[in-house]
Amino acid sequence: EYDKVYLDDFNTEEEAYVIEFYQPWCPHCQHYKPTYIEIAAAVTRRAVATKVNFFAVSCELYTNLCHTYDVHGYPTILGYGIGSDPFVRGIELNGDDAPDLSVESIGELLSIELAHEQVDGWQSSYSNSEDRRNREREKEEGAIKAAETKREWQSYPSTLNDRYHNAALSLAYALKTGVYTRFGKLSDDRALALSDFLDLVDWTTPQSWSVRTGLVKELRLRFHDVVISSKANLIELVERDQDLHEQKKGDAATGHLWGYIDAPRRPKRRNAITGLGGDVPDTKRMDKIASRNQKWTKACTHGLPAHGFTCGLWDLFHIITIGASLQEHQLYGFHGGYLTSHRDVALTIRNFVANFFACDVCRWNFIDMYDNCGHDHCNRLPSESSIILGESGGTGRGAEVVKELPLWLFQAHNAVNVRLMDEAAARANRNVTLEEKRAALFPPVAMCSKCWTNVETNEYDPDAVYNFLKTWYWPKREGIDNGFASVLNRNLVARGIR
């Protein structure tokens, strides 16, 4: 299916090679870049008799090369010692069974002799008390800047349409780059995980969402003959849906981008600024972004295009969990034969991340959180559908448990935000500050003052947070199709609710 591309310019008879395969959107790849450069410089400096060449390859640009060497997680670092064969997969220097990548581990695994280098202690970096004060001042300024930047990102102007466009692009990107990471067809387990996730998107996302009624419907109808037949067929199907939209709506006159939720009427100016409740961008903003149908909006990228994928994927997960909490969607999914309990929804998201999210560190962290009952989901999320436990709009047990799934994901997402802030501080050789942790939390207090009861301990008001998430991720008026309405009305009447 693919033209294999090899590292045939490598002269492994005389030189050694280290190659990092990465994806521009992968957060860990972005964070790891300075470390990789530092290690490369140290190995080059200390190698005694062997020239060691370091490279970095974008798997977004050089897809066939990455497929040839069976790269399916990022970053993947392969090494070739003297005498090795560059036409086969090299030694995985950062694999599960390998030690943490370091100058010494590269030397050991590739049989490279390294000169000894004295490492000065931490204290030696300060020649006097003035140096120490300057360093502490730099740390403090770094923490303040990090908190300010995060607050700006969290409060960046964003519309409901932005969020659905970003979610749609991330779904498409995951399908095009994350499903087929090796040659051949999907394994049965991966095919099942993908099928379950597409079913989940079908019954949990708004009925009026064109991605659901277009792309997702087509993917489910043609799952066996197209989706799991080959990568080329899957990409063609996804891109055809995007191209069809561009031909019909992707122009500055309408302001529609692929994945938009079309609001039934223009909002008041206040909503156009805050981004709450089914708003659309103002005309000037539409003109600017209408030509960028294949790009995530600045609400996700903040001017850094590689950051869009994970942001849009979180948007998609939040949309899904809100939809799964709504009674009408529970009924639709239940009568469609889907597993609609919140525990099943969380597991389906977990399996999608495990199989199709290629950032290794991101994937491992999410799976570790889920598999170890992170945020108490194994006790909080019921194994029965909420339509069995009670109505979402009522006052019984069902009215409370329907909120737990969106709240669980809200906690999981914020825990990731705080962890990333902590890791960024560690890379700067300092401890994360309380102000940075506060800035990492979403929604910011300025955006939802009632959401947080104690921001220092991450205590929140469940009702306020759920209402905010529903307003932030769900349209005010959901255009329900006739089939959906028929199922809903029939069941509400049968249960004496209508």
Image (tube, rainbow, N blue to C red):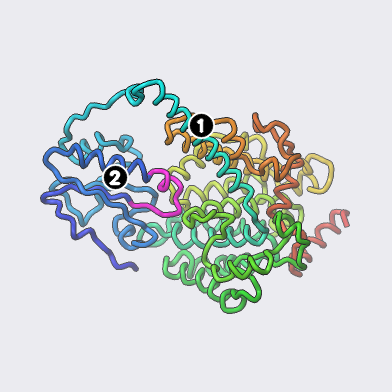
Q: Give me the disc on residue 422.
A: none
The amino acid at mark 1 is: Glu
Report the residue at 21% width, 42% height from top: 44
Within 10 Å of disc 1 (Cα), the crowding (few <14, some 14-19, many 20+) is: some
Q: x%, y% of residue 285?
A: 63, 65
The residue at the point 27 percent across, 27 percent down is 119
Relative horizontal placement of residue 255, taking residue 78 as reference (left or right): right
**Rendered location of residue 5, percent (x, y):** 26, 63
Q: Nearer the viewer, residue 138 or 226?
A: 138
Residue 92 has which mark? Answer: 2
In the image, taking residue 437 as reference, residue 135 lies left or right, namely: left
Residue 383 shows in the view:
no
Does 24 lie within the magenta span?
yes
Q: Is residue 199 above or below residue 124?
A: below
Q: Which one is in front, 8 or 118? A: 118
- Examine the structure image and report whether residue 308 is included in the region drawn in magenta: no
Determine whether 412 is above or below 281 in the image.
above
> As drawn, is 482 to the left or to the right of 357?
right
| Label ID, residue 140 | 1
Q: Residue at x 35, y 39 (%)?
A: 96
Outermost residue on the bottom side: it is: 247
For disc 2, the neighbor class at 10 Å (few under 14, some 14 to 19, many from 20) is: some
Q: Position of residue 90 (x, y in %)?
A: 24, 49
Residue extent of the magenta highlight = 21-32
What is the spatial separation of the Cα atoms under label 2 and label 1, in whole angstroms?
38 Å
Position of the N terminus by quadrant: bottom left
Discs 2/1, front: 1
Amino acid, disc 2: Glu
